Image (spheres, grey):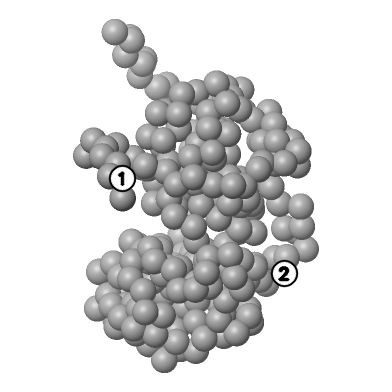
Amino acid sequence: MAEHSRRVGVPVFLPSDVVFDAQTHARADELIARYPVGRSALLPLLHLVQSVEGFVSQPGIEFCSAKLGLTDAEVSAVATFYTMYKRTPCGEHLVSVCTNALCAVLGGDAIYSALSRHLGVGHEQTSGDPNSPGSITLEHAECLAACDHAPVLQVDYEFYDHQTPDSALDLTMALQRGERPPPTRGAPLRDFRAAELEIAGIRPDLAEQIDVPTASPQTLRGASLAEQTGQRAPAMPDHVEFPPLPEKK
């Protein structure tokens, strides 16, 4: 068996047989046109690639670099910096369990352990064929900015609040059966690739999807108390003199 050596720290992206079709090229052009400088569209373009492939492959890197006039190295540097860009194929659903401080002490670690045992996988690993219905990729997640609902997890970036190991297992088994239990708040659950298309900024039916509150009473409690007691933030002055910007060197 041939051995392939590489320098430590040099990112490797998997090959892919996905061909980016005319619709994907048109969507990429639409995203690029939204920015005065084309390279600013790199983040949404990487999400667009994931909506097609389910991860970022070497051809996906090359697609972005060709569209934006960047080098593969420049695109790779961004794709390896942010954890939302996956370098191996994701399942139909991505389950992200918050194991940061507050969620962890309230049960997040136990939730992750229960799901890991049930699925037989660890961090950023997939149970089942990534291209098959019911396949699930599991990951630890840093703070999901929902401490008022801890412990929480996300499925394809939609929130499921106040979870327990049992409720998380029920949710995961429902996903494996092909069901899509409604999130606690926000848009209806779809799948990882559909979520990536929306994150990229292509939202053909978003207005029709979101017909439920996206913020909970717990989250709005502070604002409600301030309104009840007549508290207001100081008004911004009409004219503010800002210090001069330092000269570029």
Q: Is residue 212 above or below residue 164?
A: above
The kind of residue tagged 2 is: Asp
Q: Secondary structure at mark 2?
A: loop
In this picture, residue 118 sits left or right of residue 232: left
Q: Position of residue 2 (x, y in %)?
A: 31, 45
Q: Position of residue 39 (x, y in %)?
A: 53, 26
The kind of residue tagged 1 is: Ala
In this picture, residue 121 sits left or right of residue 186: left
Q: Secondary structure at mark 1?
A: loop
- Name the outermost residue toward the bottom: 166
Q: Is residue 193 above or below residue 161?
A: above
Residue 200 appears anywhere in the view: no
| Residue at image mark 2 | 211
User: What residue is drawn where x is 66% and y is 36%?
Assistant: 28
C-alpha distance separating marks 2 and 1: 55 Å
In this picture, residue 209 sits left or right of residue 62: right
Q: Position of residue 114 (x, y in %)?
A: 34, 85
Q: Nearer the viewer, residue 124 or 143?
A: 124
| Residue at image mark 1 | 2
User: What residue is drawn where x is 26% and y is 37%?
Assistant: 6
Q: Nearer the viewer, residue 246 or 186?
A: 186
